[in-house]
Amino acid sequence: MNLERHASSAAKKVSYTTPVYIIGGHGNDYLSSKPFKVPKGCMIVVKLEHGMLAYGDSMDAMIHNMNFIPKMYLQNPAKYASHIIRSIGSVAIYSEGQMCPNFTYYLNGCHEDTCPERRSGVLDFMRTGSDLKAGFGKDIDYDDLLINVKTFKDMCDVIANMYEHSVYPTKTDMYNVCLHIFKNMGVNDINTELNKNATHDYDSSISLLFLLFKNVLSRLEEFSDKNNTPIRITQEELCTKMTGVYYNFVCRANETHNQNVDDSNNNFQGFGKEYNTNPHVKNTRKKRIEEAIMHRRPYIRNRELAKIDDKIKENEDLIKFLKKGKEEHNAIEIEEIEEELIELKKARNSIRNTLNIPRVKKPEGGQRSTRKTHKTKKSKAKVKAKA
């Protein structure tokens, strides 16, 4: 299929009531996962290339920048790709009917020693974008935990608040999951647990509280499954649950991820014969190239041509306007604009040829005249019959 045409048709199918989601957590793009066909009403916008790792600061910056993109553009990334690319850089867009990698997500944003506030789950950007912008870069303060967390319900409030902007799983879902965990652990009072194992020394208390917090986090996946709200979920499953436009800024590490693959984001040369013949690296390179051609280049191309197309239309409209006037100087100005038009069209054709974009063929004159002649003969025959 013509990629440019597909991008155009995908743009038309998006409604302006379409939800916009951001994945809050971690991700993988396993080589062994089979791609899925994007269902009706779903679209996926992916920032990173296959095998790459995401970092919190860059994700924060992209969420921040998204707040300056009109929501209508975010709802229809295929049509307004140039505006999105200008704000957050190159993206791959998978639209309805296309085969998309079946990304695996872990919908909890905590890292080894930090947990971002209100940034876990499938985040509803249309409803809470400004709140996400205001809160970006903020982590849970473990000192505050020691002051505010007195009971297991207080701890569950902290866990649930991480999902404040999430439509899946919801804040209530995760509160119930946390209660289920504490019930299983047999913990009723946090202070009692701390006093059992420590003196009133501040460092000891906060360390034990942190360990308890980490223990709860480590069980979220197990108990969210039991609660029928799994936080380890695939993109296909999410599209089945909720239609909308998904913005994926998280990691795309695969099961064979290593630092060499990550370092080769933009350059696969210079790593030696052993590296370049590694099947995992070759597969990673293949996936990146295929995605670049099918799902990144069409939208970058639209961006490059958009400025020239706009300028051509602007000049053509100006010529029409000037031709309506009778001033002598208009003819000179029209001539100058027409010369500029010729150069602009040459530039447009040059870009199209470089990117191997097929041109839309106009109906041949012969076919059109044949149809007209055919109609004319019929009408003449009718006239003779009447006579």
Image (cartoon, rainbow, N blue to C red):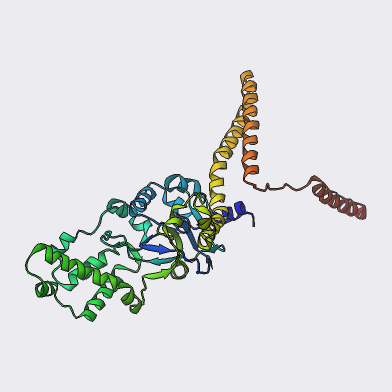
Q: Nearer the viewer, residue 209 or 226?
A: 209
Q: How many numbered markers are drawn?
A: 0
Q: Nearer the viewer, residue 95 or 91?
A: 91
Residue at horizontal 37 percent and vertical 47 percent from the top: 65
Q: Nearer the viewer, residue 259 or 330?
A: 259
In the current view of this chain or complex, which residue is farthest to the left?
200
For the question of whether residue 12 can be seen, the reply is no
Q: Position of residue 124 (x, y in %)?
A: 37, 60
Instruction: Determine whether 210 is above or below 323 in the image.
Output: below
For the question of whether residue 279 can be seen, the reply is yes
The answer to whether 330 appears left or right of 179 in the picture is: right
Q: Position of residue 268 (x, y in %)?
A: 51, 51
Instruction: Determine whether 215 is above or below 135 in the image.
Output: below
Instruction: Determine whether 336 is above or below 26 in the image.
Output: above
Q: Position of residue 358 (x, y in %)?
A: 67, 48
The answer to whether 294 appears left or right of 362 in the picture is: left
Residue at horizontal 28 percent and vertical 52 percent from the top: 137
The answer to whether 187 appears left or right of 224 in the picture is: left
Q: Quadrant of residue 1?
A: bottom right
Q: Quadrant of residue 253?
A: bottom left
In the current view of this chain or complex, which residue is farthest to the front?
273
The answer to whether 123 appears left or right of 13 in the picture is: left
Q: Quadrant of residue 47?
A: bottom left
Q: Position of residue 259 (x, y in %)?
A: 41, 57
